[in-house]
Image (cartoon, coloured by chain):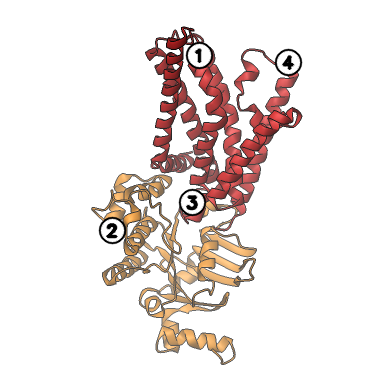
Amino acid sequence: MNETNITTAAPILHIENMTKLYSNGRGVRDINLDIYPGDIVGLLGPNGSGKTTIMKVVVGLCHAQSGVCDVFGHPIEREYEQAAAQMSCLIESPALYENLSAEKNLMLAARVRGLGKQDALNALHMVHLDGYERDKVGRFSLGMKQRLGLAIAMLGDPKFIVLDEPINGLDIEGIVETREMIVRAAREKGCAFLIASHLAAEIERTCNKVAVVHEGELFSFTTMDEALRRSPTLEDYFLEEVRKKRGGAL
Amino acid sequence: MQLFMGVFRGEIAKLAARKKYIVFLVIEVLICAIVLLVQMAVEHASGIGLRGLNLRMMLLGFFISIYIPLIIFMGACDLFSSEVSENSMRASLMRPASRFKVFFAKTFAVYLLGVCYLFALFFVTVILEIIGGSSLHGFFSSFGAYLLDAIPLLVMALMAVFVNQLTRSSTLVMLICIIVLVGSYVANLFLPQVGAVLFTSYGQWHNLWIGTTLPFGAMIMKIGMLLGYGMLFFCGGYYIFERKDM
């Protein structure tokens, strides 16, 4: 779907030879990734493979040791505000203030983006949390917190959204709604997504591109159509790519 | 500026949502009322006119040296180490405001918290003095003293913020800050030469300006010392905050 974008539009996210290693030696090495408007890129990999580290560098929560990471053409390290102006994210569990109400949590994010109370309430409505605006987040279930995290991420119609395990804790309806919301935003508004998950089936249903991450390395990055042309399911594609890189062994 | 104000208002909202700050404000009022009642009781029993004593200045020393620094330490812990350990710091850092703006807004919010307690003390003592039938003599000079004492509170806030960057345990931060505060008071008591170069010895800043004024050279040195401490804590704290992986 985005073959034309790849050749014509400027990438929203450009990562080149990016390396981020923690003191324990874990992290990611030599990552290369370009994301264009309308792309829904799924980062697929097992737990601890480096998906979250890539996302943290992209949103400026972690500092890469080397390489390039540009968002909307701005280096995330040096021009954070310009890079983050149209970007939002939900990394790991939603970062919420448990002693504040849902509305106040949203308002904290809304004020920084120059938005008002009505925008915050609209975002709550979008994730079906109307009626809970005055309730303290500490009393919310995991699924409700995840919905609120998604509402904060979607606030102000950003053009690039980074979501780490977005369906974590959601019920079936919530999973379907989230998926539809992502696909709709990409198709209608040209919004780009970088989504991490260890669930191949979910990536297959939601994303139009897939990047396989394993042990801190990016094994492959291709369109979903291409991945499914090579293998019957994304799960098979993932196992095949890992096997190929390891010379036949899993 | 709009971006900074958005972050700053958020930090104030976070502090305002914590009920303990209201409780501590009530305790502050109660301490003032108790002191006034004791003053009146002593006066009644002994017949010595104590009401001539300035309640505003009498309580300023205790609050500026002990009570308000503790509030500042608590505020700094709530906005820094607690947020890091509760994983909510990421919420502040994932918004389109630079780390400098976030750090500055949080630090300024902590300072403002201390200043609010300081001026609450002033207004409470004034009201109590009016109720107690005092003449409110030296109103403007005591207001000036409060204004002057608000300056070293900034260094206190910067110190607390700096210590918050060293560990994510708010209990440990509180402990370190209290040890630094008490340690410096003790040093000031037993080793006046050492105490003179510690920032905590400038807590009651008004003493330098009101009453016996120090020579110009000594004043410049003390201002420079306070500025130096402030810059050191701010730069050190910001450097660690900026480089931190969340």
Sort mark 4 into few (<14), some (14-19) or many (20+) by Cα contacts within 10 Å.
few
**B171 horizontally vs B28: left or right:** right
Residue found at the far left of this picture:
A131
Chain identifier for the red-coloured part of the image: B
Number of the front mark, 1 or 4: 1
Dot 2 lies on which element?
helix
The disc placed on residue B66 is none
Chain letter for mark 4: B
- Name the amino acid, label 4: Pro
User: Which residue position holds label 3?
Assistant: B83
Residue toward you, A240 or B62: B62
Number of the front mark, 3 or 2: 3
Pick the quarter of the image with the C terminus of chain B: bottom right
Chain identifier for the orange-coloured part of the image: A
Residue toward you, A58 or B217: B217
User: Which residue position holds label 4?
Assistant: B215
**A103 horizontally vs B18: left or right:** left
- Name the amino acid, label 1: Asn
User: Which residue position holds label 1?
Assistant: B54
x and y, in percent, of residue B205 in the image: 62, 23
Dot 4 lies on which element?
loop
Name the residue located 55 percent from the left edge and 41 percent from the top edge.
B104
Number of the front mark, 3 or 1: 1
- Name the amino acid, label 3: Glu
Name the residue located 58 percent from the left edge and 33 percent from the top edge.
B154
Tell me how far mark 3 sits from mark 2, CA to CA: 28 Å
Badge 4 or badge 3: first in the primary sequence: 3
Badge 3 or badge 1: first in the primary sequence: 1
Tell me how far mark 2 sits from mark 1, CA to CA: 59 Å
Name the residue located 54 percent from the left edge and 40 percent from the top edge.
B73
Tell me how far mark 4 sits from mark 2, CA to CA: 66 Å
